[in-house]
Amino acid sequence: DATAQGTIHVADKARGERKTYRAITALMGASKDCEGAQVVISHCENPEGALQLREQILADLPVRSVDILPCRGLTSFYAMEKGLIVGY
C-alpha cells in the first residue's frame, strides 16, 4: 500500500497462502469498486500461486477478467522469486 509521501507500508498481515489471498481480495474490494474490473496478475516463477489468487479473486469480487502473465525485466526485481504483483 502506498502512502501520501510515496513510501510503501504493510497494508495487512496474514499467515498462510489461503489467508493471504483472502486478505488481498478484501483489500482490493475495500480500495475501489471492482465491478467489471480487469485484473492482471504478474508472477515471478510462481504460476501455481497466481492461479490460486485468480480463483480467490473470481470467487470474492465481481471482476470482468483476471489475466496471468510472467514477470519480465524490472517487474521481476520488484516481485522477487515466487512473488505476485496484482494490478486492477
Image (tube, rainbow, N blue to C red):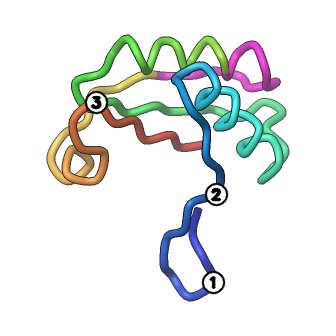
Task: Look at label 3 and name its amino acid.
Answer: Lys
Which portion, as a residue range, is magenta?
57-67
In the picture as drawn, the residue positioned furthest to the left comes out as: 73
Circles 2 and 1, Cβ within 8 Å, touching? The answer is no
- Label 3: how many Cα within 10 Å (few below 14, some 14–19, many 20+): some
Q: Position of residue 46 (x, y in %)?
A: 30, 21
| Above-or-below relation of 54 to 20 | above
Q: Is residue 23 left or right of residue 32?
A: left
Report the residue at 38% width, 11% height from top.
48
Depth check, front residue: 18 or 39: 18
Q: Is residue 51 left or right of residue 64?
A: left
Q: CA distance from mark 3 to mark 2?
A: 20 Å
Question: Residue 4 shows which numbered tag?
Answer: 1
Depth check, front residue: 22 or 32: 22
The residue under label 3 is: 82
Q: Position of residue 78 (x, y in %)?
A: 28, 53
- Label 2: how many Cα within 10 Å (few below 14, some 14–19, many 20+): few
Q: Earlier in the sequence, mark 3 or mark 1?
A: 1
The residue under label 2 is: 11
Q: CA distance from mark 2 to mark 1?
A: 14 Å
